[in-house]
Image (cartoon, rainbow, N blue to C red):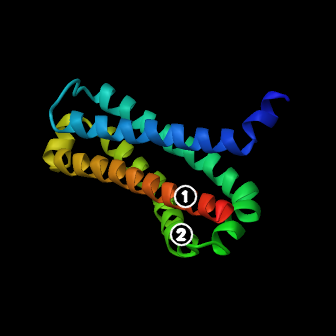
Amino acid sequence: MDFIAIIQSKPALIGLHLGFAIIGIDAFLWLFGKLRGHGDQSQRGLIATAIVGVFSFAASWIFGGYYYVIHYGTLVRPIIKSGEVPWAHNIVMEVKEHIFLFIIPLAMTALFITLLDSETMERLKLRKLAGYLALTIALLGLLIGAMGFIVSMAARWGVFN
């Protein structure tokens, strides 16, 4: 099996989707801490942390989107919808999809704020708000992860029941 075939397999896509999401969540939690005055608060450090978060969420978005288009619709969704908990797709997955679409624009907004110099950030009183934005992004990432767990469990219940 060549590298591309491995990357396109269902388990690899799910792992890459989840792995990059975890890195993105961690980066925005780290950014929240930096904006609250802990650790390296240099503009360069803020920007680097935000870039890691944006890149990670974008990679998670790409791998998750590919999995969703290629595997979920044809293999997983029918199992969930015909199983014990069809609401896992009808409600949870639909909500997850819509939150997922907003993670990248929110993350980019946080990145753009970190591009402001410290004086401008303080003058516009954005430091505290940017911290709350970073925390919100991380919490939304965790919420999406919990929703993914519910959908995954619904698929397993559909297969084994």
Residue 88 tag number: 2
Say which residue appears at 50% left-offset and 44% top-offset: 57
Residue closest to the eye, 34 or 78: 78
- Residue 105's image quarter? bottom left
- Relative image position of residue 13 (x, y in whole percent): 66, 43
Element type at mark 2: helix
**Above or below, 19 relative to 82:** above
Q: Which image quadrant: the N terminus?
A: top right
Residue closest to the eye, 112 or 87: 87
- Relative image position of residue 47 (x, y in whole percent): 36, 33
**Above or below, 120 relative to 129:** above
Horizontal side of 131 relative to 64 (left or right) equals left
Q: CA distance from mark 2 to mark 1?
A: 9 Å
Q: Which image quadrant: the C terminus?
A: bottom right
Neighbor class of circle 2 (other Cα within 10 Å; few <14, some 14-19, many 20+) is: many
Residue 39 tag number: none
Neighbor class of circle 1 (other Cα within 10 Å; few <14, some 14-19, many 20+) is: some
Residue closest to the eye, 42 or 118: 42
**Above or below, 85 relative to 63:** below
Horizontal side of 124 relative to 87 (left or right) equals left
Per the image, the residue denoted by label 1 is 153
Element type at mark 1: helix
The answer to whether mark 2 and mark 1 are in CB contact below 8 A is yes
Say which residue appears at 68% left-offset and 51% top-offset: 67
Q: Amino acid at mark 2?
A: Ala
Say which residue appears at 16% left-offset and 38% top-offset: 36
- Relative image position of residue 106 (x, y in whole percent): 40, 54
Horizontal side of 56 relative to 34 (left or right) equals right
